[in-house]
Amino acid sequence: MNYPRRHFLHLLSGLAVAPLAGAAETSLNVAGAAKYVAARKGYALLIKQHGKVIHESYANGAKKGEARRIYSGTKGFWGLAAMAAVEDGHLALNEKVSATLPSWQRGGKENITIEQLLDFNCGLERCLKLHQDGLSNRNQMALDRPLVGTPGKSFIYGPSALQVFHEVLKQKLKGRFLSESPTRYLERRVLRPLGLGSQRYLADAKGNPLLAAGFLMTPSQWARMGDLLLAQGKPVLKASSMGPLLEGSSSNAAYSFGFWNNRAADKMGAREIDIEDMLEVDWDRQNWSRVCIAKGVPKDLIACIGSGYQRMYAIPSMALVIVRQGLNARYSDGDFLRTLLG
């Protein structure tokens, strides 16, 4: 599969930090991390290393086996579906959206690519109303949103771009020998290989799911996403598909396809921020330059981030997968991770 040169170079750098089989156990401050989570309205903390659960605890009235909202953690699963569609030949990342959706052949949208939708740098108004229940046609509402930023240069985090991607995938899967909806495609290509069943899709009257949020998962279920990241895409994707999924974009190097990265952590002038707080600021006042999730933490850290500090972390170089679920509180990614990693 031919990706642009930047994809290939990033893939090589990602492989360099993959853990060696049988790597020595890292000394972790598990007790301190569990205490930190419990003291900040945390419900669950699950830690896996080398594929084995080394800690699992519940606090503040939570119990094992309870599925909770992962909010924007949902986005990463659709990012996997997008790369699966590339592997299966249904679409190309550099393909123009307007080639599939004629309504985008005007209004400045004609050159927007599928990759720009998935990186949230297509310039489309975010339209938070798309999160509401009872909508008649969520996809059409997204398609009709105006451009408020410059495609390729404006990071605008919100549900509208993903809903446009859903419409693209919907059209791509139509009329094939084994025609299926994007939801069924997601289940077959992503969820089932991960040992997960159907999810809460929050479909509108037309059957269009909300791609930006909605899934309910237990910590052990969400941790399977981390297992995939440590296994360089297995059992869903080829290792060669992981570069575009995790590389970031020109407008926000720390985000792409539902995944946040920590690659700026060791750079001069790196800025550790509260990502959720930054996303509350108007998009044109956000500053994503040299942003990292946590300083003093391996730069190969990958995170799926959901509202209220729902977190799934994967650190390939340490063979670690960590899930935190709970309520909104005075939680810090950096403080938690530095506590755990010592």
Image: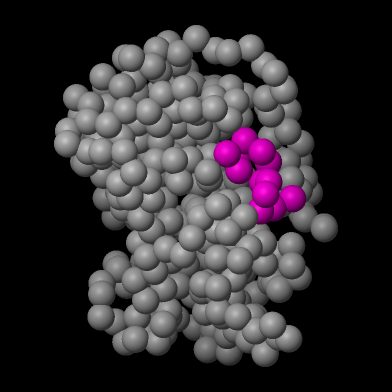
Using the rendered image of the protein, determine whether residue 235 is visible from the camera's viewpoint. Answer: yes
The residue lying at 37 percent from left, 76 percent from top is 203
Of residues 51 and 324, the one drawn nearer to the viewer in this rendering: 51
Horizontal side, residue 317 vs residue 301: left or right: right
**Residue 337 versus residue 185 in the image, above or below:** above
The residue lying at 31 percent from left, 22 percent from top is 34
Please identify the quadrant where the C terminus is shown: top left
Horizontal side, residue 125 vs residue 118: left or right: left
Of residues 100 and 76, the one drawn nearer to the viewer in this rendering: 76
The residue lying at 76 percent from left, 70 percent from top is 89
What is the span of residues highlighted in magenta in the rendered image?
227-238
Residue 196, percent from left and from top: 51, 55
The residue lying at 77 percent from left, 55 percent from top is 3
Count of all numbered marks drawn on residues in the image: 0
Q: How is the image coloured?
A: one colour
Residue 269, percent from left and from top: 47, 25
**Residue 294 versus residue 128 in the image, above or below:** above
Residue 41, percent from left and from top: 19, 33
**Residue 295 versus residue 44 in the image, above or below:** above
Of residues 80 and 4, the one drawn nearer to the viewer in this rendering: 80
- The image quadrant that residue 144 belongs to is bottom left
